[in-house]
Image (cartoon, helix red, strand yellow):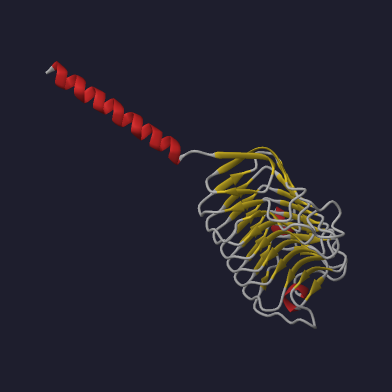
Amino acid sequence: MKRRMATWTTLAFAVCLVIGVSASKAHAVATISGTGPFTITQNTDLVGDVNCSTTTVDCITFAAPNLQLNLKGFTVTGPNADCTVRVGDAGINTNGQAHARIVGPGKVQKFPFGILVTGSNTLVREIVVIRNCAVGIDVVSNKAQIRDNIVLKTPGNGTGINVQGNDNVVERNEAHGHGNGIGVSGTGNVIEKNSVTTNAGGIVLFAGGTNNRVGNNLVLNNSSVDIDDGGVANVVTGNIVTQNNVCEKGRGAAAQAVCADSPTQPFHINHLVGPAPAP
């Protein structure tokens, strides 16, 4: 009996070891830092800055679905010192992989495209995307969530956040210093609670996109237009620009009905911060 008990104990211990090893492998996280480019095939953490200043391809590329990239406070740097000549491609490219997650804090800078989202159901959150030549965050997919990012300074006519797909959510981001702060050309996208200031165009809805909802955004001090829903030359219909936006300069029927074209007209800031106090 003692020998049988010992045998069962040894077998159980061996099974536990195997299960433990399997679980460890299943939850393993790769780490990267230093000179890129890199291709990731499992959940990955940055453990130092990533330098792609001499590369002409994507710096970090997803090669499987359902992966999470954690920047852990580090910076991904590309080859474009001043954008006079665009070199390279994207800082981070989801490469058509679904359910990708790119999570900060962290910074992506000096690429033509800071973050390129080409797989559905992707999350980009809490990233500072700065001084990328063409687009800060380019969403060419559906059902992505772009939340809580700070997107700054695309030189010339670049765009901070560009949404070309459908049913995406762009929420609680800051977009400053671009040709267009946020550009939307898809259908069924939600653009809410963003701060979009000091661009040429603030939130711009392009022809071909319908049923996009724009609400609760602060869109001020953009030199050309704050919210553009098509204007005379590029008529857009079917979008929802709510009264909850704070803006001055509107173009197109939906935006003009909301934005105050004269400083003497009231802003709708009470919708954002609560009702005005009684006189």
Q: Is 101 situated above or below 211?
A: above
Residue 222 is at least partly visible in this image = yes
Count up the numbered dots: 0
| Residue 178 picture location, percent across and down | 82, 60
Q: Quadrant of residue 185?
A: bottom right
State which quadrant residue 168 falls in. Answer: bottom right
In the image, 39 versus 271, the foreground residue is: 39
Residue at 30% over, 28% down? 14
Q: Position of residue 241 (x, y in %)?
A: 69, 70
Image quarter where the C terminus lies is: bottom right
Q: Give percent across and percent down for residue 80.
A: 81, 53
Q: Position of residue 259 (x, y in %)?
A: 78, 69
- Left or right position of 72 against 85: left
Residue at 73 percent of width and 47 percent of height: 52
Task: Left or right? Give the position of 94 relative to 200.
Answer: left
Q: Nearer the viewer, residue 135 or 24?
A: 24
Q: Quadrant of the N terminus?
A: top left
Q: Is residue 188 above or below residue 271?
A: below
Q: Residue at the top extreme?
A: 2
State whether residue 275 appears in this view.
no
Extreme residue in the left direction: 1
Viewer-proximal residue among 133 and 149:
133
Q: Quadrant of residue 172?
A: bottom right
